């Protein structure tokens, strides 16, 4: 049995993708059911039910937020996650080198391989790929579905350009060895990719057991702008104002209210503790993906 979970808020064109999923599965005589989310958290519950009922796979149709919820529900189970991306960032699709077509993604159910990756946590919320605190998360907090659907990835640029004019509070980062660092912003990555196909952590390993911490040390709004431009050009790793460090966990706090996001979805205010868990997620990927089967 294959369960298909989709997010109708991901945009009007998601319906077209859903119909292609339906046609693909029907044409191959595969048993399936389609479930539509109606509110945040629905996909977590639905995926958990699918796993409990012994579904072979859950196909998530939507953006990284939908993927995050489905992954959360499947963590620790034998049910596989397949992803048909439709959204703004689609970091998951780029991280795992998924095909661009709906049919190509679904082909992986039979022609791909299944790997097991550890999920991370931000406080009590699991995430797969990345999280952040400070400026980037505050931009995500101010985004809404209508802006994403109308503008796509440009919505982040416009919202970020407005938000950079505001006062930017400093963050305090604490590592397991009790090293404390003051920073302007921080990104926590499990893999290599960030939104817009940016390689934010060249040494990131989604199959590994640690986090990649990317911290902007230099204060000020224009430092954030320069960091963003450097990241787009792949030059942030050579900046003396950027710290990149591998760690099993990280604690982040702020003296005044600031935000945290996971997999492109607003989580809540700081403080937050990021950790890597023992909860395994089984993901369907192309056979060429450089990770051991699971």
Image (cartoon, rainbow, N blue to C red):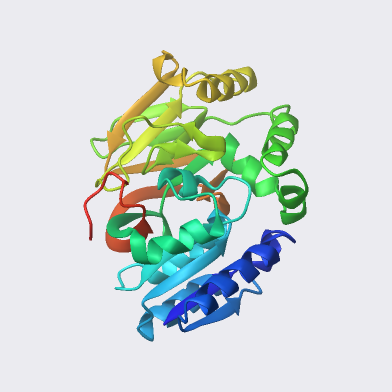
Residue 15 falls in image quadrant = bottom right
Residue 206 x %, y %? 32, 46
Q: Is residue 257 visible?
A: no
Decide which of 175, 188 is in the foreground and name it: 188
Q: Is residue 231 visible?
A: yes
23 left or right, relative to 208: right
Decide which of 246, 151 is in the foreground and name it: 151
Q: Quadrant of the N terminus?
A: bottom left
Seen as rendered, the residue at the extreme bottom is 53
Decide which of 222, 264 is in the foreground and name it: 264
Q: Is residue 236 above or below residue 282?
A: above
Q: Quadrant of the C terminus?
A: bottom left
Decide which of 7, 97 is in the foreground and name it: 97
Q: Is residue 96 above or below residue 25?
A: above
> Which residue is pictured at 29% across the width and 30% down the height?
179
> Which residue is pictured at 26% across the width and 40% down the height?
176
């Amino acid at each position: 049995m294959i369960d298909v979970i989709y997010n109708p808020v991901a945009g009007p064109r998601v319906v077209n993708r859903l119909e292609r999923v339906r046609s693909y599965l029907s044409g191959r005589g595969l048993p399936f059911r389609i479930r539509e989310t109606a509110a945040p958290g629905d996909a977590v519950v639905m995926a958990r039910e699918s796993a409990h009922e012994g579904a072979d796979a859950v196909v998530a149709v939507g953006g990284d937020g939908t993927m995050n919820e489905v992954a959360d529900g499947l963590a620790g189970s034998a049910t596989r996650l397949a992803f048909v991306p439709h959204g703004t960032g689609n970091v998951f699709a780029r991280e795992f080198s998924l095909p661009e077509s709906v049919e190509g993604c679904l082909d992986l159910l039979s022609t791909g391989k299944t790997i097991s990756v550890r999920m991370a946590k931000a406080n009590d919320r699991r995430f797969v790929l990345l999280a952040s605190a400070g400026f980037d998360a505050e931009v995500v907090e101010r985004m809404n579905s209508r802006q994403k659907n109308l503008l796509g990835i440009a919505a982040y640029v416009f919202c970020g350009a407005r938000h950079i004019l505001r006062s930017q509070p400093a963050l305090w980062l604490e590592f397991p060895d009790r090293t404390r660092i003051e920073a302007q912003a921080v990104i926590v990555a499990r893999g290599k990719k960030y939104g817009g196909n940016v390689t934010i952590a060249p040494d990131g390993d989604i199959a590994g057991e640690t986090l990649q911490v990317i911290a902007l040390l230099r204060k000020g709004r224009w430092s954030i702008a320069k960091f963003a431009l450097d990241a787009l050009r792949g030059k942030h790793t050579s900046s003396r104002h950027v710290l990149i460090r591998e760690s099993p966990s990280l604690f982040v706090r702020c003296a005044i209210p600031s935000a945290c996001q996971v997999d492109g979805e607003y989580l809540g205010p700081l403080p937050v503790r990021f950790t890597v868990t023992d909860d395994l997620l089984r993901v369907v990927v192309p056979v060429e993906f450089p990770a051991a089967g699971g």
